[in-house]
Image: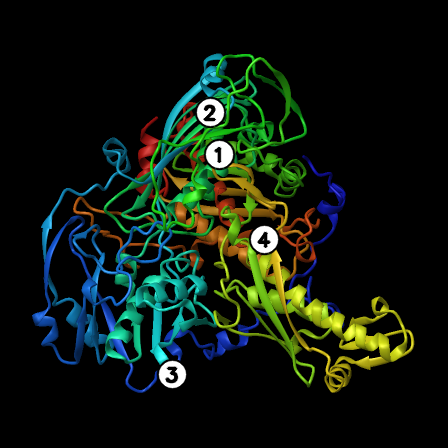
Amino acid sequence: MTTPLTTPLTTLLTTPPTNPFSTPLNSPAAGQTHPHESAAAHIAGSAPYVDDIPEVRGTLYAAPILSKVAHGKLLGVDTQAARAMPGVRAVLLAADVPGHKMLAAFAGDEPVFAQDTVQFVGQVMGVVVASSMVQARHAARQVQPQIEALPAVLDVRAAKALQSFVQPPVTVRRGDAAQALARAPHTLHGTLEVGGQEHFYLEGQVAYALPQEQNQWLVYSSTQHPGEVQHWVAHALGVDHHAVQVACRRMGGGFGGKETQAGHMAVWAAVAAQQLQKPVKLRLDRDDDFMLTGKRHPFSYDYTVGFDDSGRLCGLQLQMLVACGFSADLSGPVADRAIFHVDNAYFLQDVDITSYRCKLNTQSHTAFRGFGGPQGMIVTEAILGDIARHLGLDPLEVRRRNLYSDEFCRADFSRPGGLKSALPTASLPAASLPAASLLAASLPTASLPTHQGQDHTLRRDTTHYGQVVEGNILQPLLSTLELSAQYQQRRKAIFAWNKNNRTIKRGLALTPVKFGISFTATLFNQAGALVHVYLDGSVLVNHGGTEMGQGLHTKVAQIVADELGVPLHRVRPSASDTSKIPNASATAASAGTDLNGRAAQFAARHVRDNLAAFVSGLDGVGAGSVQFENGQVRTFKASRSFDEVVALAYANRIQLWSDGFYRTPKIHYDKTTLTGRPFYYFAYGAACTEVAIDTLTGESRVLKVDILHDVGHSINPAIDIGQIEGGFVQGMGWLTTEELVWNAQGVLTTHAPSTYKIPTAGDVPEHFKVALWPDANVQDNVLGSKAVGEPPLMLAISVFEALRDAVAQARGDGQAVALNAPATPERVLWALRAG
């Protein structure tokens, strides 16, 4: 349903934005800008990462042995030359894994080390362990595997023809798309190719495994999911989970690339440490990191869309071919989320979506910021842009025409086989999945029954998977940005510019984002935390989330500080540690603060309630009247410092620490039909982007960006704005310059900064404005906030659409623009010449 604008539109447009970098004195910690908790240490170079941890005497170093063949039978491995090199202590292969030979991944389809076959260039066949990192790396290149080459599958369309899938295809339907297309006044057919993306975290993959007493293990891992690393290491070593402790104080970036795939490094280091009974560190160099780790999933699309004279969608048939790589990894949930986000901000009444999870002989692709959401949204935005050009309409008006709203439409069940309601269906060919897969149940295995002979009314506020869109601010948000970014005036000016300039053409696009917040695998939507208050009144907080530079620890500390009424500097976050918070979910799905912040708030609240009950007894007042603020504990009879109350409470044996636990409410999800309410709420946003292209070279530049984004009540405005800016630029790179190229032999040829180009400061336009939507989350989320990690990346789809607009205006033929992503200069030229 559409939520009314609680802040008047005229106020939003005339009130100067508050300075996010000014913090009023004596104000609550949350809702204000505070520096990142490690900012000073980052600047000083004193914030230690895994590779900075002082090494224990006797530490050895491991380097991976990589396959140079995309697909083949592994007949043997000659290690003699490597073993003879200086400093080499061991060469370890699959037979040396003491526990399970397969990784404890969800699908159970990936070996620790290659066994009988190799399945991509870069697959790890073993490790060399030596006295130095350089010695290990040099020796690893001297290992000689004997491989009998087999045909490699490197293209998703070839994979589909061969029925080569890591998981069975999934189809989600609502209504009767075929009949809707047959009746539609207009139809378009098209294809789209969208490439993957390298995570390019500043800190590469690294793990340091140290043997402890009685066959116990301490692993320092640069990971977004310490609990999963613990699981994987225990599985490979053949020990109980409680024998493995995994710790991570901070990462130098993650972006999803360290959600599952950090586990590989930890397992390889731990296997080597177990074999040699020595501490072992494994740190990938950048080239190896590129060659063996997964990327954002590339997608290919085929679609047919029907629409009326106003541009409103009538029906959509969409086929998505997902390049998953050689194993499932997280491809199932990524592809599912892409299905969930095909709608983006738009109501799809009659829709038929089929997703093919294609097995290729490449790296196994994995989580990346947005987790399939960007790949779901971009195809629909491209379709709407082409519809506008076909009809000669402003693309913004076509987008606005299709937004979710409170309007009603007719849902006719009388047609045979027709299903048009808030009851979508999902189907899956009969197939069995590995029993070890925790997420196997997330794939549909049945269809809902078809209802006939009924006539119902359907509101345009229900997604194609059956969730009602609550808190919908799309209409007022787009209208606000349209005015503040002067979209209409700029569009006229761009038309005039393009008319008078032959070579440089400009384009403009304003696109929305609606992104669902929660893990689609419901079991992961839980978190725990510990809050300790010490005798001097200082506070230590520990939670299951991980810090990768995004400011999670800072926000959690702010939440705890306000719950206890103490200054922020009195609260210190500590390293993520499986010995403190067990079974923690990955820091992913943009839910880090939602889950861990709420758990820490509850833990702090338990401590505060203990202190309030104690003080109420001292002063003879009700516990509910005791106030905690500005480092003071007040009743109407007395005021004491927080430190004084803590000391008195300890002397009276009052518990000064507590745990907190949180599980996301309301969500439910039928795994057999891919329907229900998988998301607790939606985050909204919009971006208006202006670009220029050179029609002679295909080069492009982003000229102006205006963003209005919904973070609810911001816990830390500067951190949130930083996430929005960074997410947008990362998305801009995905869609413009970051090109992954595999050659005919399956070799990733863009495996270093010399050939793989991420955006630099010079690519960020001088005009880059970000404003925050002022209203709180309508759901009961921590402090009224909303997630901010992933949604801003999809704002960069406005860059791609602006480039397509520039190409269309340069051609002037009103035809669909055949531009694939990333929109490199070559592709822009091809699109210009296709007209």
The picture quadrant where one finds residue 563 is bottom right
Residue 7 location, x and y as percent?
75, 45
Residue 827 location, x and y as percent?
32, 38
Q: Amino acid at mark 3?
A: Pro
- Which tag, 1 or 3, sits closer to the chain's start? 3
- Which tag, 1 or 4, sits closer to the chain's start? 1
Residue 265 location, x and y as percent?
32, 65
Quarter of the picture containing the C terminus is top left
Dot 4: element: loop
Dot 1: element: loop
Quarter of the picture containing the N terminus is top right
Residue 244 seen in the current view: no
> How far apart are the two marked residues, 1 and 2, measured between alpha carbons?
19 Å
> How far apart are the two marked residues, 4 and 2, measured between alpha carbons?
30 Å
Residue at point 26%, 53% (across, down): 750
Q: Amino acid at mark 1?
A: Thr
Along the line of sight, the residue nearer the viewer: 534 or 555: 534
Judged by depth in the image, the label closer to the viewer, 1 or 4, is 1
Dot 3: element: loop
> How far apart are the two marked residues, 1 and 4, measured between alpha carbons?
27 Å
For mark 4, what is the residue?
787
For mark 3, what is the residue?
54
Report if the CB atoms under discs 1 and 2 are less than 8 Å apart. Answer: no
For mark 2, what is the residue?
316
> How far apart are the two marked residues, 1 and 3, measured between alpha carbons?
51 Å
Left or right of residue 385: residue 23: right
